[in-house]
Image (spheres, rainbow, N blue to C red):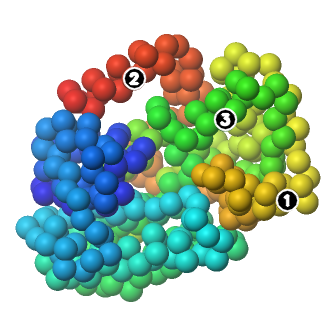
Amino acid sequence: MQIVLLGATGFVGHHLLPQLSAAGHRCLVLSRYPMACRELSMIPGVELRQTDVYDAERLAACFSGADAAVNMAGILNESGRNGQGFHKAHVESTERVIEACRATGVRRLVQVSALNAGKGKSHYLVSKGEAEQRIRAATDIDSTILQPSVIFGEGDSFFNRFASLLKFAPVLPLACPGARMQPVWVGDVVAAIAIALQDPRTIGKTLPLVGPRAYSLRELVEFTAGTAGLKRRIIGLPDGLSRLQGWLMDFVPGKPFSTDNYLSLQTDNTSSENSLPTLGIKPHSIESVVPGYLTGSPHQHRLDNYRKRVFH
């Protein structure tokens, strides 16, 4: 199968592409900055191509001859605060993908969205929901929408980020400590993507993907500290201070936290429904996976990562 992928140069894509390659698929990865992820081109059957995904003609040229598309494009924060960045990255990019599918006759589309997309007041969730609406309205395309919770795994920006913070912070002020989430392993997510691409029973479906258990954010940070062998004091901030922290971080380069993140955390990232078992996938717990990459030699982790990408 020839597959065009958008947003595949990030964390999930680095885990997905070796699996698609091992299954014999040919993958065309679109990126504005392919030189920043040249290691992906070492995976057999993977081609990186520089393009502007908002240019309808150039995008259609990339879709020509493809059998399916996977859209994982997305951002967790925008440079501004009015939602325009989220709208462009999530809604407009999805509109261009739909147009490219129609222009080239590509009927199969897998959209990686977010759990509880369309709920709450954050620009992130609202724009993810709007993108899903565009896909459901495109009834001439055989689409599947996947809605993962917070995705964890080797190279993630969740447990790894908190572990880095905790190394240098004996006391950590934590915004929204009671926020609930149900982390899902990246290996389970990429397995779901691979299955959805070839299982016609998933067409027209919206599939929530979550781990086996829900946690509060405080529990997850405490788990991170314990796994990394760090004794740290976690101070949960009340709502007012959590909101203030988000506002202050809006002006910090890179936005490690933001007002929009704060708003996203007001909606529990959990689900009583889980499509992983329906797809034949047994969800992995954080306890069975996270210690494997938060402990040990960073050099060895990099070596293992390199071997997986090239040879698997």
Point out the tag, 2 or 3, that comes first from the N-terminus: 3
Residue 61: image quadrant is bottom left
53 sits to left or right of 28? right
Disc 2 to disc 3, C-alpha distance: 19 Å
Cα–Cα span, label 1 and label 3 = 20 Å
Label number found at residue 134: none
Marks 1/3 in contact by CB < 8 Å: the verdict is no
Image location (x, y in percent) of residue 10: 40, 48
Q: Earlier in the sequence, mark 1 or mark 2?
A: 1
Give the residue drawn at x 53%, y 72%: 85
Choose between 2 and 79: the one closer to the eye: 79
> Measured from the top left, where is residue 36 in percent x and y?
33, 45
Callout 2: SS: helix
Task: Measuring from the top left, give residue 269's x and y in whole percent.
Answer: 65, 56
Number of the label disc, if any, that sits on residue 302: 2
Q: Secondary structure at mark 1?
A: helix
Let me know if residue 20 appears in the view: yes
Q: Mark 3 — residue? A: 162
Residue contact between numbered discs 1 and 2, judged by CB atoms under 8 Å? no
1 or 3: mark nearer the eye? 1
Q: Quadrant of the C terminus?
A: top left
Q: Is residue 106 visible?
A: no
Query: Is 33 above or below relative to 172?
Result: below
Residue 31 placement (x, y as % from top left) = 29, 58
Q: Amino acid at mark 2?
A: Arg
Would you name the residue on which mark 1 appears? Answer: 244
277 versus 260 height, above or below: above
Q: Residue at x 13, y 57 (%)?
A: 2
